[in-house]
Image (cartoon, grey):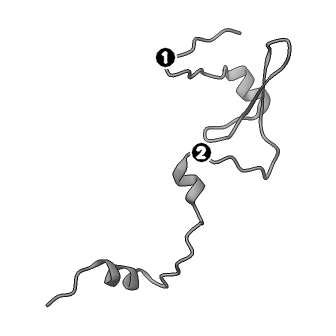
Amino acid sequence: MQTMMTSKGQVTIPKRVRDELGLMPGNAVEFEANAAGEVVIRKPAIGKRVARDRFDQALGSATVKWGSTEKLMALLRPDDE
């Protein structure tokens, strides 16, 4: 199987390979290059989370508890004077 790489370094994983690995949109994949210059692609072990971007990495890291939307909005809105 052959595919073309874009100028951004992106490639499409052929459908036959996606089907074989059970890959779905949004799934993480792992790449590994061996000494022979071959690349192995695999689906990470179940339960292993791979951050997709900086927002995903920050998910769940807030330590402030707002309690409710009303309390948060009251903090963000200017006082009516």
Task: Indicate the position of residue 69 as horizontal and vertical percent values.
Answer: 41, 80
Which residue lies under the disc numbered 1?
7
Image vertical order of residue 36 relative to residue 16, above or below: above
Task: Indicate the position of residue 56 as horizontal and vertical percent values.
Answer: 57, 53
Q: Residue at x 67, y 19 (%)?
A: 14
Q: CA distance from mark 2 to mark 1?
A: 21 Å
Label 1 sits on a secondary structure element that is loop
Q: Residue at x 39, y 85 (%)?
A: 71
Q: State which tag comes first along the sequence, 2 or 1.
A: 1
> Which residue of the protein is positioned furthest toward the right in this rendering?
35
Quadrant containing the N terminus in the rendered view: top right
Task: Check disc 1 and give the amino acid type.
Answer: Ser
Task: Check disc 2 and give the amino acid type.
Answer: Arg
In this picture, residue 71 sits left or right of residue 40: left
Label 2 sits on a secondary structure element that is loop
| Residue nearer the viewer, 22 or 31 | 31
Quadrant containing the C terminus in the rendered view: bottom left
Residue 65 is labelled as none
Q: Residues within 10 Å of mark 1 (few under 14, many from 20)?
A: few
| Residue nearer the viewer, 36 or 3 | 36
In this picture, residue 73 sits left or right of residue 27: left
Task: Indicate the position of residue 74 as horizontal and vertical percent values.
Answer: 32, 84
| Residue nearer the viewer, 12 or 30 | 30
> Which residue of the protein is positioned furthest toward the left in this rendering?
81
Could you tell me if the residues under marks 2 and 1 are in contact, i.e. CB atoms within 8 Å? no
Q: Which quarter of the picture shows residue 36? A: top right
Which residue lies under the disc numbered 2?
52
> Which residue of the protein is positioned furthest toward the front in this rendering?
35
Task: Indicate the position of residue 64 as horizontal and vertical percent values.
Answer: 52, 78
Image vertical order of residue 25 relative to residue 79, above or below: above
